[in-house]
Image: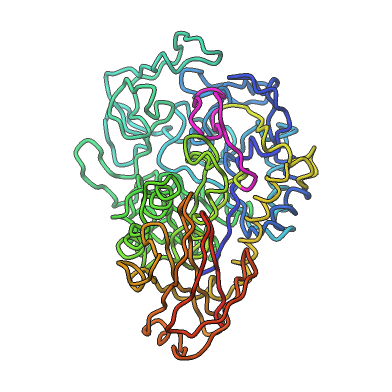
Amino acid sequence: MDKLIIYQIFTRLFGNQNTTNRQYGTREENGVGTFNDINDEALRSIKRLGASHVWYTGIVEHATQTDYSAYGIRPDDPAVVKGRAGSPYAVKDYYDVDPDLAVSVPDRMAEFEALVERSHVHGLKVIIDFVPNHVARQYHSDARPAGVVDLGEKDDTSEQFAHNNNFYYLPGEAFVAPVSSLNSDGLAKSPTLHEFPAKVTGSGSITATPDRNDWYETVKLNYGFNIFDGSLHFSPVPATWSQMLDVLLFWAKKGVDGFRCDMAHLVPVEFWKWAISRVKQQYPRLIFIAEIYDPGLYRSFIFEGGFDYLYDKVGLYDAVRALMEGHGSCYELTRVWQQQSGEYAQHMLRFLETHDEQRIASRFFTNDPWAAIPGMTLSATMHNGPYLLYFGQEVGVRAEGVEGFSGDDGRTTIFDYWGLADWQGWINQGRYDGGGLSDEQQRLRSFYQQLNHLVNGSDAIQNGYFYDLQYANDNGQSAGYDAHQLFSYLRYTDRQKLLIVCNFSSQTTYETTVHIPHHAFSVMGLDPARTYQMSDIFLTNTDLETVGLEGVPLLLPPRSVRILEIK
């Protein structure tokens, strides 16, 4: 397995230099980032940061309030579009790219293909979203290849569920959009959409009247699971399976290197097993990442479904976030690796920010981007699996204020046109050199770059075993060691041995001696009676000398880490 470092770009926002930022503003008012804005300088800077992959979010065409009918694209009823720009997870054509992202709308696919090629030239592999559970309520593909049957085209709408239907239906009921959702300018207006019979909403809500907090803008796809009675109908292969395989192969042929599969756990694992194996027959190095929030499904989605990586959200993210906010315990970190992901840790994708999560620097999380130091270091170095950075995280983007549909919630909007004011210093008028960043932002980005380069250059972190040292230091075994706030562990191979200690406390400096037990020396092949040189190879460049079993004396300021190479 590769120790991937994935850099997530929300494509609509990344290169936008317009900071007019009118709430619910139009594309013309607030601007939009394009494929072409992600230029050679941008890609060079991402590669220098240490990334191996770029996840371009929001590529596939989705529902929007912007009218592109002049280019042969059907307009969407505002009743079923969240925000002015629309959610990238309300896909309305699996075979096209978002026209917002193009300089020349008729050439939009060619501009995307050029971005893929440009990324590859800079040594970056490309990941895009595959959204299989649901589509936009007015889904219609006008770019599908000849011979491809459109979703719903052959459905029997008189049946709630039919084996080869793409959608689920509520015969005799008409869809009613939540009126409160219909504001492009903050004003409610009457819906004009006529959907009869109503389709089941993307979340699986069996109602013709979903509310504003539901996924009302989407409809759920049918993979042979009858949501009305729980029965399974996987043989013969349902029509949706074959149609989705065609979509995956279409994009793989475009040169993408992987798919981040949205809400993968809402799609039967039987489909994933069938589809992923067929894609990998033709593209064996293509990777699949599952957005998944049910630890009970982890094992089956890896070993049966064939996923390369799974979100470690309900697990490490939740445990680390609690620590960063000052109400967690490092005992929870031990529980996560022991009970949820320890034996398949290399398959877990770690992160502290994504488009779905609140920004670290926002008042809804820590209000301080530097709180990420121990949590991000742990997420990157605890195991062999990949980790992810969301664009702007490395300069402390705060994401505060009401942009439009999503409101003031500490997340960077995915629904509206917007320009990130605290990101402009890095864009620096398209130079992507950070010329406009503050000194503090420069230092923060330097931390992330140093972390990535450490990971890329470390045999122990990339390939090594993990050894939790909490049991040898807690309960008073090591004076001054607070096992609720300190977490220590080893990463080791034959070539390199590392002791990593993280202090999650925002206020307390700990003076302690971290003990490495006899058993740990044994598994590392080291003599516990020897004297060892220990050098911090990460942030402090300090050196110390100690006899193995006597422990490692450390002074750990608040929110600090030590990565000591044992020689």
Does residue 83 appear in the picture of this structure? yes
Q: Where does the magenta region start and end?
A: 394-415
State which quadrant residue 304 falls in.
bottom left
* Colour theme: rainbow
In the shown orientation, is residue 389 left or right of residue 171? right
Q: Is residue 154 above or below residue 263?
A: above
Q: Residue furthest left?
A: 229
Q: Position of residue 538 (x, y in %)?
A: 61, 66
In the shown orientation, is residue 261 left or right of residue 111? left
Q: Position of residue 84 (x, y in %)?
A: 57, 22
Is 403 magenta? The answer is yes
Q: Position of residue 177 (x, y in %)?
A: 39, 18
Q: Position of residue 41 (x, y in %)?
A: 78, 49
Is 366 magenta? The answer is no
Name the residue rendered at 27%, 19% in the picture.
172
Name the residue rendered at 32%, 33% in the picture.
168
Name the residue rendered at 41%, 74% in the picture.
467
State which quadrant residue 48 falls in.
bottom right
Given residues 437 and 269, the one toward you in this image is 437
Given residues 450 and 371, the one toward you in this image is 371
